[in-house]
Amino acid sequence: MLDSLKIIGEKNLDYWLDYMIKYDKVSSSNKKTHLIRIIFDIDNKRIDFDWKEIQESVLKKYKWIGHTFSASRENVMRLTFDNLKYLNSIENMLKNKAKLDIDLYTYLSEIKNNFDLSETEKAVNEYVRKEKLKPSLYTICIKKERELDLATLDSYTQFLESILKYTKDLREGICYICGKKGKVFSDPAFEGGSLLKVYVTDKKGFISGISKNEESLVKTFSICADCRWSLIIGERYVRHKLMKKVGPANIYVIPRGGMNEYNDGILEAISNIFDKTAYGWDPIKRIGEELKRYDEYIKEWYTLNIIFGEKEQASFKLYRFVQEVPITNLRILIEKIEYIANKAAKYWKDGNNNWMLNLSNITQLYPLRKSGSKTIIRPLIELFTSLFNITPFPLHTLLEQAVLLARIYRFESYSNYNISKPKDSDIELSYKMIKFNYFLLLLKELNMIPASTNSKIEVSEELDSKITEWFNTMGYNDLQRGLFLLGYLISQVGSEQYKKGDEKKSILDKLDFKGMKEEKIKSLASEMLQHLRNYRILKYNEPYYYKMLEMINKSQQELDKDPIHNLFYIVSGYAYGTYRVIKGGDTNE
């Protein structure tokens, strides 16, 4: 990972400031905030003020990069800051005279010598109150013959680079990154909360000799200034362009491959390929044709390191490090996702975007429990890890998640999970359970769960052609078909109950959403005949009823093996029948 970050950083050294800019002050709502320009008028010995509305361009122009880098205890040395107490940056910067350009040093000295900074704070607050502004940033300006925004000067950029690159004193040693002997840092002092904070030397147990003296620190992880700076820029690049937010998970994508023939389009291509896996793509464009554009990059960048983690105060919490994922795996995923989406769209006569199973959509099928304000994401990480590596995943775990999803929609227990409340829980249950069936089909196509070896069934008078096609596509065995038909009949009764004002469909109370055991299934199957008669829909559903009994009786020895499995296929049948009614393709008339 470090070698890739170093190379990425070296290729972007000229753009380091672009990746340091923080855009956290841009409001996501309509509430406007302001940058206050504090103008020290040297000629007239007074302080003037001006303001600008906070926008991304303003943050970039005035070089808002935060206050500190590796530790909160650092002396703040910034000309743009978000708290007036950091007016003391002027004094702190003057103490670093060796790193200041002579002109910038002169400007700051004149401000210090001509103004009382404690009085400045009062004047700023009075201006803000009078103008009714909402300040989120302040910046230092000077007026001497002409007005200058000091934060926009190249000399300030050079100063920032110097203090960020050379954080501490150097000593003799060997750099653990490039292997060269020379001046090194004994402590890398990487940015707080960054991905690089997994490489820390602040715990004695990880230090050579279990001691925090300089000699032990150098033996543990010493690094030269150039390598450290390249790693920092590389990590910032990844954070800006190759970090993907998928549901509650932060995914960092770090390419690893040949760099001798480096092409500026490679990293963008990697990002685009991953975006298509994570978020989908324009359904108008055929993905196969788009992928051809990236073939040369796929050959060059042959693997990806994928990291799941998040900033946790000043540290970085690492959940999983997935190493050496072939980039061709992403191509396989993309192509299979499109194949399944097209198959579903053709069946339901929908746009394939409704059935896209990219990573983002998968998170909506995979319930994750909340603990306070946190979402427990480890189950999702386990699934994504298997998807990236295209390795087997436990089928029972998937079915448990599917029936949990159904239970959440049925009992509307949204507050405990990452599942958002829809307009209509029953419709969403139906749609999501059908989609989960297609997700299982995708995993079968990838050989991640066992594929069916059942022979296909022919279209007959007992079952309509659409259900027969569904069975053959999904590869259900006899028991699964029987359970599915039981669920389908429940949907028909439920539809009639809904028409009569029973919006909760009381027939669903017959299901145990924690799992359906053999005796419960047999009892419900027997009851269904009377339910169909009561609602006068037996004549439309009698063939399905007897076919259901036939298939369940045929597989009786398997009925008591897995209540979760049983429930999943019953609910799938219910979802299928309900969704067909919604789509207008099935009625009891």
Image (tube, grey):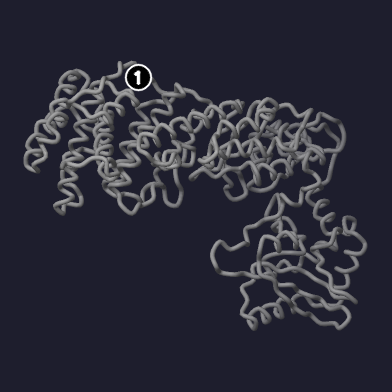
Residue at x-position 75% and y-position 41%: 187
Quarter residue 544 falls in: top left
Quick check: 73 left or right of 438?
A: right
Q: Residue at x 70, y 27 (%)?
A: 300
Does residue 362 show up?
no
Is residue 416 toward the left or the right of residue 570 in the image? right
Residue at (30%, 52%) from the top-left corner?
424
Which residue is disc 1 drawn over? 452
What percent of the width, then of the height, locates residue 461? Answer: 18, 25
> Callout 1: few (<14), some (14-19), or many (20+) C-alpha neighbours within 10 Å?
few
Residue 582 to residue 447: above or below: below
- Does the image show residue 244? yes
Residue 327: image location, x then y, percent: 61, 28
Residue situated in front as seen by the camera: 40 or 148: 148
Residue 228, compared with residue 304, is above or below; it is below
Quadrant (top left, top right, bottom left, bottom right) of the C terminus: top left
Quarter location, residue 489: top left
Looking at the picture, does residue 383 appear above or below residue 392?
Answer: below
Amino acid type at image mark 1: Ser
Number of numbered discs on residues = 1
User: Image check: 168 left or right of 580?
Assistant: right
Q: Secondary structure at mark 1?
A: loop
The residue furthest right is 102
| x and y percentages locating residue 527 in the rendered image | 9, 35
Q: Is residue 163 above or below residue 50?
A: above
- Residue at position x 69%, y 37% in the image: 267
Q: Nearer the viewer, residue 78 or 463?
A: 463
Q: Position of residue 507 (x, y in %)?
A: 16, 43
Quarter of the image that includes the N terminus: top right
Q: Is residue 343 left or right of residue 489?
A: right
Give 542 or 24, whichever is nearer the viewer. 542
